[in-house]
Image (cartoon, helix red, strand yellow):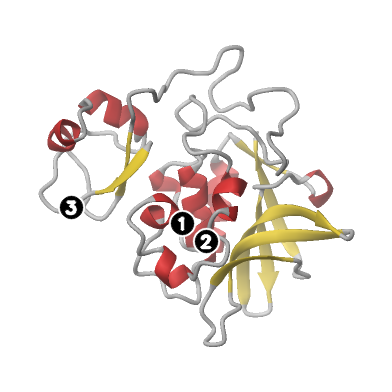
């Protein structure tokens, strides 16, 4: 599934013709769109491919975890279903985040595809933590565009309201879980990235550059944890 940034004057029917798909398929791939005649310039649009499916996976309910082990691949990241009931379109949120390691948030959010296409360009380069985590969750199909939030507390509140997410303890955390922390200057949000030498590791957009701007890194952190949200 590819991504398209909506331009002023675009219509769903025109975009559908451009990509050889239908308005119905576009709306299924973008459940945040409730009215086919109402789309917004600057927003990211998922473009379904010919093999993309939006039907619930067999043996499971929409929004539930697929498979009993809850893990896939060497990362240990959860295999989950997306908000539309089908499998998450682009892989696990953790693997999506890990693919961005080393990138500066300022340049990442200007990319036209992938995570960058779901990040809001206007967010200052030193406060992209929630912008980044939201985009990774969107790319994994775990939240809709309307659930994207650029503030830690805003994202936390939206995940609390989402029945597909539950709060868990650090000991029960799995790679890709959303971790909200209290910092001396406010809040920070990252994703759990596993354990190393007995210490929890976290991946996210962190203030590690000399000028105070953020870069995607994995590290241990000692801030008090406010919440950990895990997709069911």
Which residue is tagged 2? 130
Q: Residues within 10 Å of mark 3 (few under 14, many from 20)?
A: few
The residue tagged with tag 2: helix, strand or loop?
helix
Q: State whether residue 26 is above or below residue 218.
A: above
Which mark is first along the chain, 1 or 3? 3
Q: Residue at x 18, y 52 (%)?
A: 7
What is the CA distance from the residue labelled 3 to the residue labelled 1? 21 Å
Q: State whether residue 210 is above or below residue 229.
A: below
What is the CA distance from the residue labelled 1 to the residue labelled 2? 6 Å
- In the picture, measured across the screen, residue 19 lies left or right of residue 83, that is left
Q: Residues within 10 Å of mark 2 (few under 14, many from 20)?
A: many
Q: Which mark is residue 125?
A: none
Which residue is tagged 1? 149
The residue tagged with tag 1: helix, strand or loop?
loop
Q: Residue at x 36, y 54 (%)?
A: 117
Q: Is the C-beta separation of discs 3 and 2 under 8 Å?
A: no
Which residue is tagged 3? 7
Which mark is first along the chain, 2 or 3? 3
């Amino acid at each position: 599934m590819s991504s398209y940034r909506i331009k002023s004057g675009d219509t769903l029917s025109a975009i559908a013709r451009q990509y050889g798909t239908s308005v119905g398929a576009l709306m299924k791939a973008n459940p945040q769109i409730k009215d086919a005649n109402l789309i917004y310039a600057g927003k990211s649009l998922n473009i379904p491919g010919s093999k993309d499916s939006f039907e619930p996976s067999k043996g499971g309910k929409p929004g539930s975890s697929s498979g009993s082990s809850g893990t896939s691949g060497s990362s240990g990241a959860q295999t989950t279903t997306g908000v539309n009931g089908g499998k998450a379109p682009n892989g696990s949120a953790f693997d999506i985040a890990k693919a961005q390691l080393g990138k500066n948030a300022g340049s990442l959010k200007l990319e036209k595809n992938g995570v960058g296409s779901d990040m809001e360009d206007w967010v200052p380069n030193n406060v992209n933590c929630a912008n980044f985590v939201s985009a990774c969750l969107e790319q994994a199909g775990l939240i809709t565009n309307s659930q994207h939030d650029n503030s830690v507390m805003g994202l936390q509140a939206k995940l609390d309201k989402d029945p597909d997410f539950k709060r868990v303890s650090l000991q029960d955390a799995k790679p890709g879980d959303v971790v909200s922390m209290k910092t001396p200057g406010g809040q920070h949000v990252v994703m759990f990235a596993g354990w190393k030498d007995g210490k929890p590791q976290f991946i996210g957009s962190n203030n590690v550059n000399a000028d105070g701007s953020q870069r995607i890194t994995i590290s241990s952190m000692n801030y008090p944890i406010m919440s950990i949200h895990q997709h069911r």
